[in-house]
């Protein structure tokens, strides 16, 4: 039986009866004439009433079963062999960059027969698709996971951190991690703690437009990420994404201060309340912030995470039961996203108090995203301080969550954990906020 | 003579209220407050192949600057937001058009991405979907088959370009259009013109076609004697179609004859060698060469075996292989191409030619092609030209060409391969419901020929006027005025269809044109304020100076004068010319009429003037001295 992926119901029976498989050339007789085309897969949610053919012109058309009188296979499909153009030669002595894939496609090619998109997996394929990389570094691609970024969990952070830590010993000049953009900010923050002090640049990169389209932002983001990983004179964990809607500059964000602030724009990622770490242009780094850690630092990774932390967003009428539910689900730390300077209702405050009394740690961030918490301004805030809520200042809620999981992963509890949460370990919080 | 086949592809913008994949209105923008820059790159197919047209555009290394205005575009056009669901309104309009052409409507519509990386789409592809398959219509007894009817988004509007980038306006990007691809017809230029005209009228009959400049354009696939297909893109004016067909016939015939000459010599492929001749040509006596080489330019000479004498050969008027090469070079940013058949004309001395031949290492029978310009551009163009020369033995190359204003065609890029279409995964497939199909069949429009016939009969119009009214989409307004005003319908019709064109020819800006002024002028004629003859001058003044019709008539002194006043003026003329009347009698009418018209043009009806003048002359003759 050939592949008939996606077909169901009457359409599936008709195609099975004809001995057809995806990729075959079919001649379909209809009430109004014959149509010849290649059978293409049906999407998951398609109905069982249509057969989809790719015409010679390349168009797909959906033919209604009620029009079809006969299906005949006129040629069996041949599996196309992939022979990309040879990648350009790399000059000798280029820096070496490990490119780790986590599931978001780095670069991909299209099956015009069926429309499927396949990721590039070898170094040659990658360099053939993005030839500019050959002039920047020797790239070693390595696919670690093949998952959507919303399915990335702390266990993946640990694996990534371990792999990067090993790469440091393999004389790699820098590491690039390609990652779906949805949770890219969380992973960047998590790795910033796990790899605090990493002596090379570790650059996370994603794309807001998929790489199967000519307008994708992936190639330029990737070129910039590889270029920074290969040549920057600073170290640490960063995110490289478009600076604006143009294909000319790439923003290099600090891993603990970056947030996805738009659902679809190329420049969705923003550094919150801190200047960009650097800006990359086609000629290389154009601007580098002062005070970034140099390469070659002492490094002692701590790669474990403990999932016993929860992030709760306060809203008007939020039931205290949600705090209890978090606690019951195993949370040892609750990061609250309070309103304004960091406030929650009396009901939620009461529950937090009881959570703290039972040994939990409650931390306050703000859902305003920009600015810092200040619990001393209003009575509500003072009450929270009094009951032991730890305010996290200008730390991003998502960063605070990743940090809490990391803190728990180190085994720290009680006062020690509280101290770690409050301290600046990887640039996640600063004492001063600037205009602009 | 070998058979020429022409497949027309007509693109018609729809008059839908929104764009195809977002809620932006379909309006033209004059000012663009925002801009951004993009670079597009070819996406690779499963077999590792890259679309030749895509590679060609990418190799030029130019970026695209997009200009936008929130009044006409949003993040979707900027490719910063996924497309919204396909406009149901546009889908219905396109299905109605497909049904009108007798196409079978698709039960399920699949939106595809067609790779286009010349920058005209921010995404690097055009979203397009087949809505109808098959169908046919009849043009003067010739059956013309329809291949497909597709609904697609229009491309961005080119605003300009320089060496570094192309500039595009995003207002037009995403406007819904239908593409109707016809089966090839016999390449009789006149038939091709009539087919296009007919199809345009069919579209208009549905009431779903947008009007105005640039809302309709034709592509043509032209092949000679079963040879490769040449695509001519974007013929906007209908009257250019026959000229373009005829030019392509001559051009393709020339290329075939060149191939036959080569085949006759037993050539399988034209061998090419090339060498840098910058040094050889430095200090050349030819002013053309020294100009090309100024400012550090580079010159490379290609020698092509067996092509001597064929580059400048003109077996049909206005088509030469040499011209083809220059077009390919120009499309790649190199303006300087000189070939050996024109060395003498360009002032290259025989001694220089000999030096070039030595440098390239070729015989005196080979054709030489000098390519001069910026070094990087020359290096890019030389292999392209060598390929083109090499393939001369195969006849017509498949390529995409653009029409010129004069109806010739120019090389644009290699033809896109078929491996450039894949599904638009951001837009779900759409099922056309039975209710929609039923509604569409209820809306079937009246055949344009029967509508024009009805117009002719009901208002006693000439076929020409009736057709012009139909083509100008003025039937409704015409009929409203013809019913209401006591003026000859053919006069109203001619004011509607001939006058705007005439004023435009006289240089009156179209921006001043208004239907209300047109109606006012006709009303003024009906009420006797303005004479028929004065309508053109009055409207011209009204449009040019932004006046009302009455103001314009007053300003020009063209208010109609009444019969008593008119008689007085004619009396004056008759008495002034008494001697002439006495001498010539009735034969004095002509000179007197001339004098009267000089004074009265536009103020009174010519026929009335003539009648009164004849009466006066007769009366004068009869009167005693």
Image (cartoon, coloured by chain):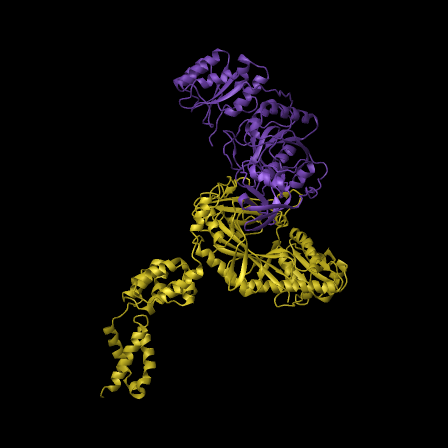
Chain colours: A purple, B yellow
Quarter of the image that includes the N terminus of chain A:
top right
* Residue situated in front as seen by the camera: A36 or B213: A36
* Residue situated in front as seen by the camera: B422 or A344: B422
Give the residue drawn at x 74%, y 65%: B264
Residue B172 versus residue B192 in the image, above or below: above
Q: Is residue A82 left or right of residue B187?
A: right
Residue B476 versus residue B109 in the image, above or below: below
Q: Is residue A322 left or right of residue B340?
A: left
Report x, y in % for residue B120: 54, 49
Q: Is residue B155 visible?
A: no
Tell me which corner region of the image, top left, top right, bottom left or bottom right, holds residue B48.
Answer: top right
Total labels drawn: 0
Report x, y in % for residue B515: 36, 58
Tell me which corner region of the image, top left, top right, bottom left or bottom right, holds residue A64.
Answer: top right
Q: Is residue A393 visible?
A: yes
Report x, y in % for residue A93: 72, 36
Report x, y in % for residue B546: 34, 59
* Residue situated in front as seen by the camera: A129 or B302: A129
């Amino acid at each position: 039986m050939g592949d008939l992926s996606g077909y169901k119901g009457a359409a599936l029976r008709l195609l099975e009866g004809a001995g057809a498989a995806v990729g075959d050339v079919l001649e379909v007789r209809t009430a109004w004439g014959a149509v010849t085309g290649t059978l293409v897969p049906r999407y998951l949610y398609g109905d069982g009433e249509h057969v989809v053919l790719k015409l010679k012109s390349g168009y797909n058309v959906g033919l209604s079963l009620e029009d079809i009188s006969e299906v005949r296979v006129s040629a069996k499909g041949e599996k196309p062999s992939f022979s990309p153009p040879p990648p350009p030669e790399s000059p000798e002595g280029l820096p070496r960059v490990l490119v780790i894939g986590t599931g978001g496609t780095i670069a991909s090619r299209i099956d015009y027969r069926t429309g499927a998109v396949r990721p590039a997996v070898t170094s040659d394929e990658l360099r053939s698709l993005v030839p500019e990389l050959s002039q920047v570094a020797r790239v070693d691609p390595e696919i670690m996971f093949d998952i959507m970024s919303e399915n990335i969990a702390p266990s993946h952070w640990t694996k990534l951190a371990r792999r990067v830590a090993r790469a440091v010993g393999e004389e790699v000049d820098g590491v690039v991690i390609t990652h779906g953009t949805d949770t890219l900010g969380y992973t960047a923050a998590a790795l910033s703690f796990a790899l605090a002090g990493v002596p090379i640049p570790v650059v996370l990169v994603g794309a807001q437009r998929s790489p199967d389209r000519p307008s994708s932002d992936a190639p330029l983001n990737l070129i910039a990420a590889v270029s920074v990983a290969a040549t920057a004179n600073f170290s640490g964990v960063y995110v490289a994404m478009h600076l604006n809607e143009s294909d000319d500059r790439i923003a290099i964000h600090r891993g603990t201060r970056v947030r996805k602030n738009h659902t679809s724009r190329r420049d969705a990622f923003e550094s919150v309340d801190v200047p960009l770490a650097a800006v990359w242009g086609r000629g290389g780094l154009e601007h580098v912030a002062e005070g970034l850690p140099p390469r070659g630092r002492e490094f002692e990774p701590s790669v474990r995470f403990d999932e016993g932390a929860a992030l709760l967003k306060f809203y008007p009428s939020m039931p205290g039961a949600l705090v209890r539910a978090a606690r019951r689900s195993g949370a040892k730390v609750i990061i609250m996203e309070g309103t304004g300077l960091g406030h929650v209702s009396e009901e939620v405050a009461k529950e937090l108090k009881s959570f703290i009394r039972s040994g939990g740690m409650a931390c306050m961030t703000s859902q305003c995203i920009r600015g810092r918490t200040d619990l001393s301004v209003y009575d509500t805030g003072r009450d929270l301080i009094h009951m032991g809520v730890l305010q996290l200042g200008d730390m991003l809620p998502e960063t605070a969550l990743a940090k809490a999981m990391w803190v728990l992963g180190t085994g720290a509890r009680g006062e020690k954990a509280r101290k770690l949460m409050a301290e600046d370990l990887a640039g996640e919080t600063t004492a001063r906020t600037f205009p602009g | 003579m070998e058979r020429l086949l022409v497949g027309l592809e007509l693109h018609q913008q729809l008059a839908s209220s929104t764009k195809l994949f977002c809620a932006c209105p379909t309006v033209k923008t004059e000012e663009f407050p925002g801009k951004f820059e993009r670079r597009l790159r070819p996406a690779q197919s499963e077999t590792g192949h890259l679309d030749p047209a895509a590679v060609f555009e990418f190799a030029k290394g130019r970026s695209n600057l997009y200009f936008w205005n929130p009044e006409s575009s949003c993040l979707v056009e900027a490719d910063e937001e996924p497309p919204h669901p396909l406009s149901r309104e546009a889908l219905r309009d396109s299905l109605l058009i497909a049904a009108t052409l007798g196409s079978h409507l698709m039960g399920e519509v699949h939106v595809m991405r067609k790779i286009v990386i010349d920058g005209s789409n921010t995404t690097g592809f055009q979203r397009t979907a087949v809505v109808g398959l098959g169908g046919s219509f009849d043009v003067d007894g010739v059956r013309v088959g329809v291949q497909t009817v597709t609904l697609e988004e229009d491309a961005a509007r080119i605003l300009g370009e320089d060496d570094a980038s192309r500039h595009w306006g995003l207002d037009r990007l995403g406007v819904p259009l239908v593409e109707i691809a016809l089966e090839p017809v016999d390449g009789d230029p006149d038939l091709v013109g009539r087919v296009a005209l007919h199809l345009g009228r069919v579209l208009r009959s549905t009431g779903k076609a947008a009007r105005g400049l640039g809302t309709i354009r034709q592509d043509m696939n032209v092949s000679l004697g079963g040879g490769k297909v040449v695509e001519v893109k974007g013929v906007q004016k209908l009257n250019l179609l026959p000229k373009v067909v005829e030019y392509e016939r001559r051009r393709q015939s020339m290329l075939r004859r060149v191939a036959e000459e080569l085949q006759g010599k037993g050539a399988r492929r034209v061998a090419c060698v090339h060498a840098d001749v910058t040094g050889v040509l430095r200090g050349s006596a030819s002013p053309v060469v020294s100009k090309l080489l100024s400012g550090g330019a580079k010159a490379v000479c290609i020698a092509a075996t067996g092509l001597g004498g064929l580059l400048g050969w003109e077996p049909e008027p206005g088509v030469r292989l040499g011209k083809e090469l220059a077009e390919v070079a120009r499309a790649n940013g190199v303006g300087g191409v000189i070939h050996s058949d024109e060395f003498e004309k360009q002032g290259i001395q025989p001694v220089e030619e000999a030096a070039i031949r030595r440098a390239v290492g070729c015989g005196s029978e080979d054709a030489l092609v000098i390519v001069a310009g910026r070094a990087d551009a020359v290096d890019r163009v030389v292999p392209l030209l060598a390929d083109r020369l090499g393939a001369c033995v195969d006849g017509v190359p498949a390529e995409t060409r653009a029409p010129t204003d004069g109806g010739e065609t120019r090389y644009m890029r290699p033809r896109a391969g078929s491996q450039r279409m894949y599904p638009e995964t951001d837009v779900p497939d759409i099922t056309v419901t039975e209710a929609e199909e039923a509604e569409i069949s209820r809306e079937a429009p009246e055949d344009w020929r029967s509508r024009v016939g009805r117009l002719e009969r009901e208002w006693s119009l000439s076929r020409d006027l009736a057709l012009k009214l139909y083509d100008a989409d003025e039937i409704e307004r015409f009929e409203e005025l013809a019913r209401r005003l006591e003026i000859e319908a053919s006069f109203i019709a001619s004011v509607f269809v001939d006058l705007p064109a005439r004023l435009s020819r006289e240089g009156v800006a179209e921006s001043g044109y208004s239907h209300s002024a047109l109606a006012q002028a006709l009303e003024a004629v009906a009420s006797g304020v303005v004479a028929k003859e004065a309508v053109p001058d009055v409207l011209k003044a009204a449009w040019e100076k932004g006046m009302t019709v009455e103001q314009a008539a007053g300003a020009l002194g063209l208010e109609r004068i009444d019969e008593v006043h008119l008689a007085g003026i004619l009396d004056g003329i008759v008495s002034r010319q008494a001697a002439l009347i006495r001498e010539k009698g009735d034969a004095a009418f002509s000179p007197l009429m001339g004098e009267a018209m000089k004074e009265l043009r536009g103020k009174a009806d010519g026929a009335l003037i003539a009648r009164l003048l004849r009466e006066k002359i007769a009366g004068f003759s009869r009167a005693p001295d």
